[in-house]
Amino acid sequence: MNTIKNAKGDAALIGKSICMRFIIHIVGDIHQPLHTATYFSELFPKGDLGGNLFEIFYPLKHSLKKLHTFWDACANKYSASIKVPLTDAHYEKLQGYSANITEVWPRSALKSELKVKSFEDWCKESGKLAKEVAYDNLNLHSGDTITQEYDDKARDVIDKQLALGGYRLADSLKTLLKLVPDSVIHELLEEL
């Protein structure tokens, strides 16, 4: 963040661009619960690497999946066929997803969560969700079949986290960009 904040021009524009991309990536990752936790058990004495060693059977896909992959894929709620660079059709699809999520989770519904401003506290919140929801209060075990109830709850949490992460990212960038001259912002946006 110091590189982006340093508006005196001593940092190269490419460094600022990389820092901006890093912030966008990290804020998004923090809001995926399994990016902030690992499960320790007899089966995983060194941890399960945030669900990457933890397999589940996902009946909707008739396949075994890593728990982490299930959460990264938003419980298969959204199309995995969207690739970058975005086509107009994919862009419209993403806009539709975003509109649906923000309709269910408007900023006004997340007022108390949006008062929390530190990355560390966001990680703690997400870690709590990992334990309570992703690992089902430690009642989910590697090899278990995902139930419809689990799937529904995961999808609800995922949508809330997508909205919350988006609002927090927007707020963070607004705060950060107030410290940067407009000319640098325009150059950064051209780089993105």
Image (cartoon, helix red, strand yellow):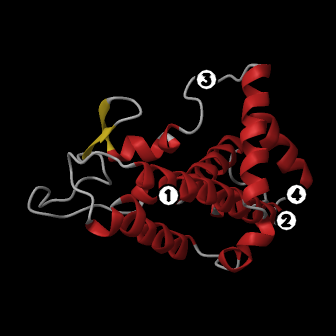
Q: Which residue is drawn at 74% across and 19% down?
A: 87
Q: Which of 144 and 192 is in front in this view?
A: 144
Q: In which quarter of the image is residue 93?
A: top right
The mark lying in front, picked from 4 and 3, is: 3
Q: Name the residue under label 1.
A: 153
Q: Earlier in the sequence, mark 1 or mark 4?
A: 1
- Alpha-carbon span between mark 4 and mark 3: 33 Å
Q: Earlier in the sequence, mark 3 or mark 2?
A: 3
The mark lying in front, picked from 1 and 2, is: 1
- Alpha-carbon span between mark 4 and mark 2: 8 Å
Question: In the image, 43: left or right of 158?
Answer: left
Please tell me the numbered disc located at residue 83.
3
SS state under label 3: loop
The mark lying in front, picked from 1 and 3, is: 1
SS state under label 1: helix
Q: Residue at x 15, y 59 (%)?
A: 46
Label 1 crowd bin: few (<14), some (14–19), many (20+), radius 10 Å: some
Q: Which residue is drawn at 76% across and 65% down?
A: 171
Q: Mark 2 points at which residue?
A: 178
Q: Where is residue 11 in the image (x, y as percent from the top left)?
A: 68, 52
Badge 1 vs badge 2, beta-carbon distance below 8 Å? no
